[in-house]
Amino acid sequence: MKKFIIAFLNLASSIATYAQYQAERYDTSYYVSYRDKLTLGPLLAKKNTAFKMNASESNALRYFSNNPSRIGLYANHDFLALSGTIGVGRLDPSSSKDKGKTKQLNLQLSFTGRKVLADIYIQRYKGLYANITHADIGNSGKYYVRPDIATSLYGTTITIIDNNRRFTAQAPFLLDSRQKKSAGSLLYGGEIYYGNATGDSAFIPSQQAEDYPHSDIHKIHFITIGPGVGYGYTFVTKQYLFLTGMLSLNGDISYITEHNLNNEKHTGWKFNPNLKMKAAAGYNTEKWGISLSYVSNRIFFTSKEIDARYLNYNDNYKLMYVRRINAGKTIPKITGFAKNIINKVGLGFLVN
């Protein structure tokens, strides 16, 4: 009996300590976490990648990847979120054979913690198209298709949420939490990227060469690094309806190399401010939630020519509906084991 009482008191003490720890981690009057539940449901996703060259506001050529929307399933428990999708092909009205075929490698790892947001990009696209701006450059119906143009982007961005006790990015973008009251936070961090774009001929069609001072460029590569600062806010109304916006401006220093058709190379350091945006809107209750989110990462850099600029950007759209159910016994053991390993190697700040 004595042993039973001691064991019971130890258990009660452990529960009280854990509850206090949880309460200290964040203010439960502002948001609540459902990470002990299994969050799962269907999703619809669309990713757009673009490479833009412009000489002025009126002269801009944008190359896009031809990616159909994807539909699939999403599951999340504790820190681990997984999704599997398949392309919908012709069911996507924005997909067309006339836009050519894009070969792609697109790996994006996202860590959405309470304090830290981190994204790792490993992307390569080959085969882009542009909407026709001059009637005489179209080579595939209504589009100018360049199967030879390839773009790559490798890098990471890290953002710290200053007011993580009251503001969370997990609720709008993962739906494994719920923001109960409106709150915002200062955001700060940094980014580093390496990227390139290549073509067998100049990026600019010869018919438009006079409009662009960098019309003879067929290859560029760059490395960019710098700190960033921004602000995020979630507005909550009617208890469950929410609207979230996060905006960060990075002050990057970039080293850019341009190659022209005469095999001449131009290099230089530039200051290039970049922009990151996240937004979401939806309805999030104790048992289920729905969210439409938008994530954009825009990397600007300038040519050696004063009036010539480049832009590489990635836009991700996602519509997600989830329900929260009991996770059982096996799933918590798996995520708990993985979490312990991550903590031991010193990366616990990404998942706690």
Image (cartoon, helix red, strand yellow):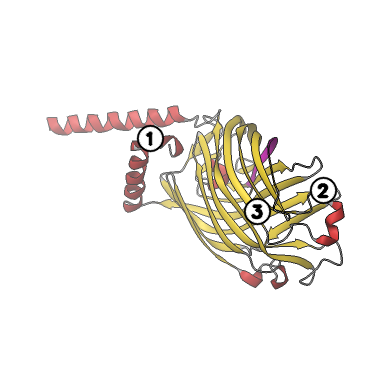
Q: Residue at x 77, y 54 (%)?
A: 216
Residue 20 spot, x, y in % from top left: 39, 28
The residue that label 1 is drawn on is 346
Where disc 2 sits, the SS reads loop
Residue 352 spot, x, y in % from top left: 43, 36
Which circle's residue, 3 or 2, is located before the other in the chain? 3
Residue 186 spot, x, y in % from top left: 61, 29
* Residue depth check, mark 3 versus mark 2: number of the one nearer the observer: 2
**Residue 42 relative to residue 258: left or right:** left
Q: Residue at x 78, y 70 (%)?
A: 139
Where disc 1 sits, the SS reads loop
Which circle's residue, 1 or 3, is located before the other in the chain? 3
* Residue depth check, mark 1 versus mark 3: number of the one nearer the observer: 3
Q: What label sits on residue 213 in the rendered view?
A: 2
Q: Magenta stretch containing residue 273, yes or no?
A: yes
The residue that label 3 is drawn on is 197
Local packing at callout 1 (Cα closer than 10 Å; few below 14, some 14-19, many 20+) is few
Which residues, given as a range, are shown in magenta?
268-281
